[in-house]
Amino acid sequence: MRGKVIAINISEKKGVPKKTIDEGRFEVDHGLVGDAHAGNWHRQVSLLGIESINKMKALGIEGLCTGKFAENLTTEGIELYNLEIGTKMKIGETVHEVTQIGKECHTKCAIFHQVGNCVMPTEGIFTKVLVGGTIKTEDEIEIMD
């Protein structure tokens, strides 16, 4: 199973939409260098598929783009939420391990308040970085055996 990275997204503060960058440096036991959510914990990197974002667009929500759901990596071609915890993925120069599928949304985001639903809590995933390196837009994502 293969996919690709269509955006790398970063924010210096929590609770704000992330801005898109051309490439990012990912460190072992940390995540995306410079991102507010990075750190030595099990949710170092967040990923969301463009397919999930498009589900929200289909509900008539305007202005959605990569980073609006605070995901670090926006992907295409893999149903991320169907991966199992422990799945390893090679992304660009890096290797990640899936540590969590979805998340509890304690403070409902602006998207939830607008339409009463959000895909990140059910379709977003989290990983930890096993092998560090650079990830660039258009890098391939390979699910490892």
Image (cartoon, helix red, strand yellow):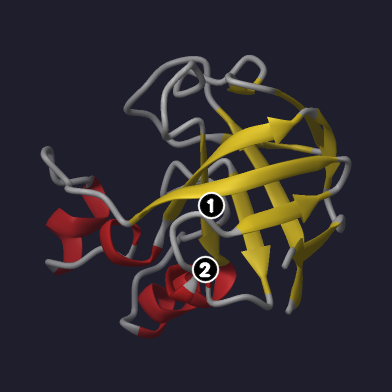
In the picture of the structure, the residue carrying the numbered disc 1 is 47
Q: Position of residue 107 (x, y in %)?
A: 12, 38
The quadrant where residue 31 appears: top right
Residue drawn at (26%, 50%), measured in percent from left and top?
103
Tag 2: Cα neighbours inside 10 Å, few (<14), some, or many (≥20)? many
Asked if the residue under mark 2 is in contact with the one under mark 1, i.e. CB atoms within 8 Å, the reply is yes
Residue drawn at (70%, 51%), measured in percent from left and top?
7
Question: Disc 2 marks which amino acid?
Answer: Leu
The quadrant where residue 49 appears: bottom right
Q: Position of residue 55 (x, y in %)?
A: 41, 80
Q: What element carries label 1?
A: strand
Looking at the image, residue 62 sits to the left or right of residue 96; the answer is left
In the picture of the structure, the residue carrying the numbered disc 2 is 80
Q: Where is residue 72 in the image (x, y as percent from the top left)?
A: 57, 41
Q: Nearer the viewer, residue 22 or 24?
A: 24
Task: Identify the image quadrant of the C terminus.
Answer: bottom right
Question: Disc 1 marks which amino acid?
Answer: Leu
Count of labels in the image: 2
| Residue at far bottom of view | 58
Seen in the picture, residue 85 relative to 105 is either above or below; the reply is below
